[in-house]
Image: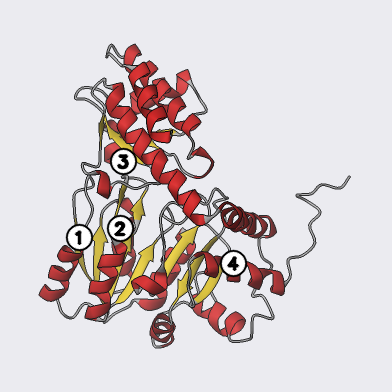
Amino acid sequence: MTHPFLDLAPLSAAHFASIEDRVARLLSTEQDVVIMQGEALLPLEGAIRATAGPGTTALNVITGPYGQTFGDWLRDCGATVYDLAVPFHTAVTAAQIGEALAEHPEIDFVSLVHAEAATGNTNPVAEIGSVVREHGALFYLDAVASVGAEPVLPDAWGVDLCVIGAQKAMGGPAGVSAVSVSERAWTRMAANPHAPRRSYLSLLDWKERWIDGGRKTLLHAPAQLEMLALEACVERIEATGPETVMSRHATAAAATRAGALALGGGLEPYVYEAVDAAPVATTLRTPAGINASELVAKALAADPGVPLAAGGGTLAKEMIRVNHYGPDATPGAVHACLAALGAALAESGLSADLAAAHRTVTEIWG
């Protein structure tokens, strides 16, 4: 018996290249785009190991858990790393970046996460990119969570390595990702004797064996389902309109933030200022004495389908994540999350004004 997911014709090199071109158009970039055959951690780590090594001096910005991971990778490569950590309830500023670069003029690599879905903040990349470009450092950006939810413009912002994934605001699978690579970044890789080669982590393999060869022969058999799903994600965003998709995420964030405040029960936005809050996910702080993981468990018992999660690691006791991205950037998902949280608060002995929350969300979406 035939099955559409099992009996697939091989994905041709031309088809693979056409999907790369569509991703490049989504990012408004003239840079080379390489689609990697794995979850976004693959190009995130591969890009660092390709461009960093002994002699590299990096400024690693930490606004959430992924920034911490990037610092670990950079140190493992032998780089000298200066961490710039800011509280997770805020965002880093271009002025803070500029001060760090002035204090350490030898810095030649800057790593940053655009939007941290895990902590609910987003960073002003356009302003930061201007400062980094003026300094002359290579600029590495994790835009996995932000792409589709807010503008991601590597060329306009001076980003040399911009990594995206399909699994959040793009509404696709986690098994495929992409990175745009500037000429400066390719030159840096070619001069790095420690850059991975003949390795699944290697970006240089894609450059030398795929791009330089005119994208005629693939390195290995591509993950067909994930590639086709990525193409479908981009196609859907093109058909809907990127501005419409981004507006939907921004509205979901605004409605969730305001709706949670109207709900009451002691819930507050984890990110203090709305301007610093990511449109891909909203994080909430639980009231004193209320464990976030336990509250989320009660909410999921009330409605198992809502996109709620507790914070990771040490944040599990105090943070709730409302993951309103992709197919969940809708009024229905926001209403359902607040209803489930309202039920959980009531079960915990706290008052919650569900009618006020729903009224607030409806007004914002209206």
Looking at the image, which residue sits at the far left?
Answer: 103
Q: Which mark is residue 22?
A: 4
The residue that mark 1 highlights is 93
Q: Three-letter amino acid code at disc 4?
A: Arg
Q: Quadrant of the C terminus?
A: top left
Q: Which mark is residue 67?
A: 2
For label 4, the crowd category at 10 Å Cα-Cα, with few meaning under 14, some 14 to 19 and many 20 or more, is: some
Q: Residue at x 23, y 73 (%)?
A: 131
Q: Relative to residue 304, is residue 6 drawn left or right?
A: right
Q: Which mark is residue 313?
A: 3
Q: Please tell me in which quadrant of the rendered image residue 133 appears.
A: bottom left
Instruction: Tell me if residue 274 comes above or below residue 34 in the rendering.
Output: above
Q: Earlier in the sequence, mark 3 or mark 2?
A: 2
For label 2, the crowd category at 10 Å Cα-Cα, with few meaning under 14, some 14 to 19 and many 20 or more, is: many
Q: Three-letter amino acid code at disc 1?
A: Thr
In this picture the colour scheme is secondary structure
Q: Residue at x 51, y 25 (%)?
A: 304
Q: Earlier in the sequence, mark 4 or mark 1?
A: 4
Q: Earlier in the sequence, mark 2 or mark 4?
A: 4
Q: Residue 102: x percent and y percent?
A: 12, 75
Q: Relative to residue 332, is residue 251 drawn left or right?
A: left
Q: Residue 92: x percent and y percent?
A: 21, 57
Q: Please tell me in which quadrant of the rendered image residue 99 appears.
A: bottom left
Front of the two marks 2 and 1: 1
Cβ–Cβ under 8 Å for marks 4 and 3: no
